[in-house]
Image (cartoon, rainbow, N blue to C red):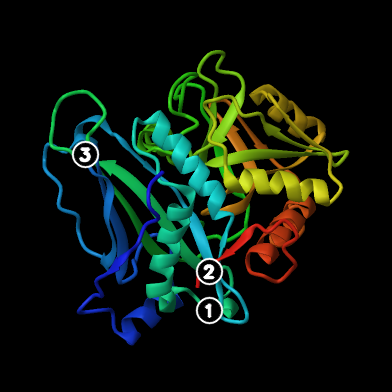
Amino acid sequence: MTDAWDFGLELRSDPATTETRTAVLDKPGFGQAFTDHMVVASWSVDRGWHDQKVTAYAPLKVSPAAAVLHYAQEIFEGLKAYRHEDGSVWGFRPEVNAARFSRSATRLALPQVPEEDFVAALRALVTVDESWVPQAETGETSLYLRPYMIATEAALSVRPAREVLFGVIASPAGPYFDTGPKPVSIWLTTSSIRATPGGTGAAKCGGNYAASLAAQAEAIANGCDQVAFVDAVERHWLEEIGSMNLFFVYADGKIVTPELSGSILEGVTRASVLDLARDLGHEVDERRISADEWRDGLRSGEITEVFASGTAAVITPIGRLAWSDGDLTIGDHSVDYGVGPVTATLRKSLLDLQYGRTPDPRGWLTRLA
């Protein structure tokens, strides 16, 4: 048992001007501008966690021999802080992100951050940089929080690092896709694999995302926005879309999502959508679903809507599926700027909860400021 973290405070001497901050908040984009401060904490085999503080956002100083640069020993998380109408700021299920961060740390042989300290780190940063959280009336905006952990020990031995840095940075965020909730197009690849059984697919680590980038470039080259991956063994079963989880809406109202296989990241938004779908009366099925079932279901009309979920993109409708020798349109997209009715209802239910417009019976919201 370690002592609870006590964060020191080193305020930035040259914070952004009101004009600069306002310009960012007017058009926040995604992950393009960052707040004045960040959280850092160090860990070593001898001392455990120490030197926790909120300090000025600045480049990190690491050795060229740092293990993260050579052996990719690192993990990260992503979640948002939402401004409610009364001015308060809330996180959505941060304890679930904390639990996943711990699972990822175990898989990458990194030390764990206790859940209460993970949440305290978020609160410490949001409290100091609260003025960077977009106002409630500015639409689908938030403050994106990026906790991360990297191996900083300067050693080229292939073993778990004995020195580690934990940090949190924050970035005002607008919609992940510039098109907003309009349907995106998906390229189905069977040549590139994101993750393998027994690998790191269920961990949120940078290597998984690096492995997806060549396929993403392939998708863009074929006129699509994102790429869908299949399993590594049979090259048949659907897994993820880039950094998002997949959902299929059937004509009878049933919602199906690929079951967690050990190579699929267990999304916080994914889990929340499943619960909200049940609340709305949908039968939910977590099972294997093949690329052929997707294509055949679109042709027959049995699959009426397809969407993806993730923290950054929330719920994103999918309007087109393309592959090396085929192309299919999904649904009629006549509702809510191309969002199908089930997708639109789920999306609104989730956003209303996150922004405090509806009650929170499950206690999913945690006040950060």
Residue kind at label 1, given as amino acid type: Gln
Q: Measuring 58% from the left and 46% from the top, which residue is drawn there?
A: 268
State which quarter of the image contains the N terminus.
top left
First-in-chain label (3 vs 2): 3
**Do callouts 2 and 1 mark residues in contact (Cβ within 8 Å)?**
yes
- Place of residue 351 in the rendered image (x, y in percent of width and height, measured from the top left): 66, 62
| In-image side of 117 versus 167 (left or right) | right
Q: How many marks?
A: 3
Which residue is nearer to you in this view: 143 or 328? 143
Would you call the spot at circle 3 few (<14 residues within 10 Å), some (14-19), or many (20 or more)? few
Asked if residue 332 can be seen in this view, the reply is no
- Residue 247 left/right relative to 30: right
Q: Mark 2 points at which residue?
A: 141
To which quarter of the image does residue 129 belong?
bottom left
Question: Separation of disc 2 and disc 1 at Cα?
Answer: 8 Å
Residue ID at (70%, 29%): 294
Numbered disc 2: secondary structure:
loop
Residue corresponding to mark 3: 46
Point out residue 303 in the picture as x, y percentages from the top left corner.
78, 36
Amino acid on which disc 2 is placed: Thr
Residue picked out by circle 1? 135
Q: How crowded is mark 2: few (under 14 residues within 10 Å), some or many (20 or more)?
A: many
Mark 1: few, some, or many residues within 10 Å (few <14, many ≥20)?
A: many
Where does the image place residue 89, in percent across and percent down from the top left?
Answer: 54, 72
Q: Compared to 290, does 360 lie above or below?
A: below
From the viewer's perspective, tell me whether residue 46 is left or right of residue 30: left
Question: Splitting the image into 4 quarters, where does residue 251 fall?
Answer: top right
Q: What residue type is labelled 3?
A: Asp
